Image (cartoon, rainbow, N blue to C red):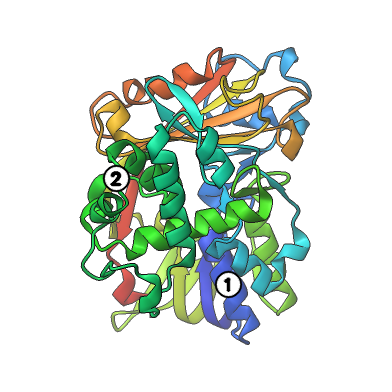
Amino acid sequence: TMQEYDIIVLGTGLKECILSSILSMHGKRVLHIDKNPYFGGEIASITPLEQLYKRFKCPNPPSPSMGRGKDWNVDLIPKFFLVNGPMIQLLVHTDVMRYLDFKVIEGSYVYRAGRVHTVPATEEDALHSDLLGMFDKRRFRKLLHFILNFEVGDHRTHQDINPKETTTRDLFKHFDLGPEVMEFAVHAMALQHSEDSLDQPCTESIKRIRVYLESMARVKSSPYLYPVNGLGELPQGFARLSAEHGGTYMVNRLVDEIVIEDGKVAGVKSQGDLFRCQQLICGASYVPHSVKRVGRVIRVICILNHPIKHTQEASSCHIIIPQAQLHRKSDVSISMVSCTHNVASEGMYIATVITTIETSNPEREVQPALELLQPILQKFVSIKNLVRSGYRNLLG
């Protein structure tokens, strides 16, 4: 059989599901195919816990102390969302928020000299922070005030700073703040994972820190939200929106061939059927020969039965280890969630360590982060390629 669509989307990762829902909302005829029997692709939430053990080829089953397997929903790639960030704005704008329930992450921390510290993102935090010296506290509050009032188009808010020419490094010098303050502000508030941004014009860092501060002001304990029942809820929410607007979904369906005619994508063959299209959108796993490896990432999912030390017993938190603390080129991050988000059994926690690989011994690179999490009941290590597509010109 042959059917015609405006657009075919392959893979149900978050980006693919967002695109298919927006296109369906705009009246396009969309067919969405996934070779997996579940939604989410690389960002799926795995349940029950036994399935995670199977996926990582663990020789022994989960310990009875971990509770019922069906109480677990473990993200393969966890992600927290800034309250005032683009993802939450998109969820509100598209009304996908009605399908989801979010909870605030309880703490935002930064690592320095072997332990974690609260990121001082409010005036009160700055006053009590051991990351700031006595004089830095006042200067840092002035910087935060400047950032919250800064408008690119309003020179009155620039305070003698030329935002097109002043670098992020110069901005901190202007407020008489040293490299230690700049480190936690750039890495744990602007969420920039390398030092490259320090010598770029400061507008991007200002914008990022402002989103962090505004997010923090709205929910207090941290600037982050996380979906109840795990990240896999997000692609499903967008898929429901797409289906409401006429989008067609086929999961657990193999793709045999991407059909090219006259140098352009013309359709997809799947299990004996031909589906024609004007345009194709797909995840990298569907066109492995057309992507280029640009790096590698290590992720370590850790199951714990305790909160992380020095986080005020937080049931969830985000920790940034700035790269200079470990003599690296890129940061290490830790995301922790727990039974309060319906992703683990009672009294259990899931902490995931992620970083870009820089050496031939990736597990040694994340060792300092794993030491913060001890004792660890079980860990699951994955090493994945970061890829970039070279196929865009063929996709319609």
* Secondary element at tag 2: loop
Q: Are marks 2 and 1 in contact (CB under 8 Å)?
A: no
Q: Is residue 328 above or below residue 213?
A: above
Query: How would you rate the neighbour count of disc 1 (Cα within 10 Å): few for under 14, some for 14-19, many for 20 or more?
Result: many
Give the residue type at disc 2: Ser
Q: Which residue is mark 2?
A: 194
Residue 226 is situated, as x and y percent measured from the top left of the image, at 65, 47
Q: Is residue 46 above or below residue 86?
A: above
Residue 122 is situated, as x and y percent measured from the top left of the image, at 56, 46
Q: Which residue is mark 1?
A: 20
Residue 200 is situated, as x and y percent measured from the top left of the image, at 23, 59
Left or right position of 96 against 371: right
| Residue at the spot 58% in from the left edge and 41% down from the top edge | 124
Q: CA distance from mark 2 to mark 1?
A: 33 Å
| Residue at the spot 28% in from the left edge and 68% down from the top edge | 160
Query: How would you rate the neighbour count of disc 2 (Cα within 10 Å): few for under 14, some for 14-19, many for 20 or more?
Result: some
Q: Is residue 59 above or below residue 336?
A: above
| Residue at the spot 69% in from the left edge and 14% down from the top edge | 63
Give the residue type at disc 1: Ser
Closer to the camera, 162 or 183?
162
